[in-house]
Image: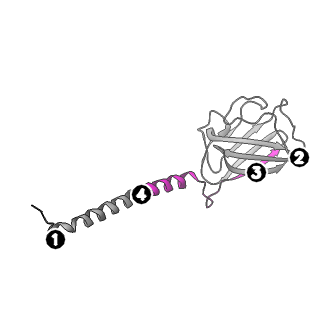
Amino acid sequence: MLRQLSSDTRGSTVLIGGVLLVGIVVIVAGVVGAAAFDVAESTPSPDHPTMLSLSVTGNVFTLTHEAGAPLHVSNIQLRVSIDGEELRHQPPVPFFSAAGFRPGPSGPFNTAADGTWTVGETAQFELAGTNAPTPTPGARVVVRVYEEETPVAVVRATVR
């Protein structure tokens, strides 16, 4: 006995297919949206760049956070060069005592600080005689600041 499909059930496959297609599109859009928001949160915003200033007097380096988001000092790396030559010992921020530097940096670079460098805060460290090259009056100093391998700022100053 052959059974014939009635006209009532023929349209249900189109309806089920449409619902499944819409469901798949919603799931894919959710995954793509979540990935886009994750990338947007981890990318530095050009609208709010980090602005730092630098002054160097003798062996004392003073960096001031002028504008931008707070920086987590434990994630920061500094690369200091004098007249194009990198320091033998780079400052391992945060620190209290480190090779090539006088003990007790001030501000957020000190291990006793709260660990966040915010706008208006000044961080200071001083080179020891065991580090090289030595800053001399008129020398050009460049400090590159990275946060987890991402360049944050490049500041320049002339030694006074």
Left or right relative to 115: residue 140: right
* CB contact under 8 Å: marks 3 and 4: no
Residue 20 is tagged as none
Q: In percent of the image, x 56 and y 51: which residue is there?
A: 42
How far apart in space, not on screen, are marks 3 and 4 (Cα)?
44 Å
Mark 1 or 3, nearer chain start: 1
- How far from the left and from the top, in percent, is residue 28? 41, 57
Mark 1 or 4, nearer chain start: 1
Q: Nearer the viewer, mark 3 or mark 4?
A: 4
- How far from the left and from the top, in percent, is residue 41? 53, 53
Residue 139 is tagged as 2
Mark 3 or 4, nearer chain start: 4
Q: Quadrant of the N terminus?
A: bottom left
- How far from the left and from the top, in percent, is residue 110? 66, 35
Mark 2 or 1, nearer chain start: 1
Label 3: how many Cα within 10 Å (few below 14, some 14–19, many 20+): some
In reply to whether residue 107 is colored magenta, the answer given is no
Mark 3 or 2, nearer chain start: 2
How far apart in space, not on screen, are marks 4 and 2 (Cα)?
56 Å
Q: Nearer the viewer, residue 129 or 14?
A: 14
Q: Quadrant of residue 9?
A: bottom left
Q: Quadrant of residue 131?
A: top right
Q: SS class of the residue under badge 1?
A: helix
Residue numbers of the magenta segment:
29-56
Residue 7 is tagged as 1
How far apart in space, not on screen, are marks 2 and 1 (Cα)?
90 Å
Q: Nearer the viewer, residue 74 or 113?
A: 74
Residue under numbered circle 3: 155
Q: Is residue 12 above or below residue 84?
A: below
**Which amino acid type is shown beneath numbered disc 1?**
Ser
**Which amino acid type is shown beneath numbered disc 3?**
Val
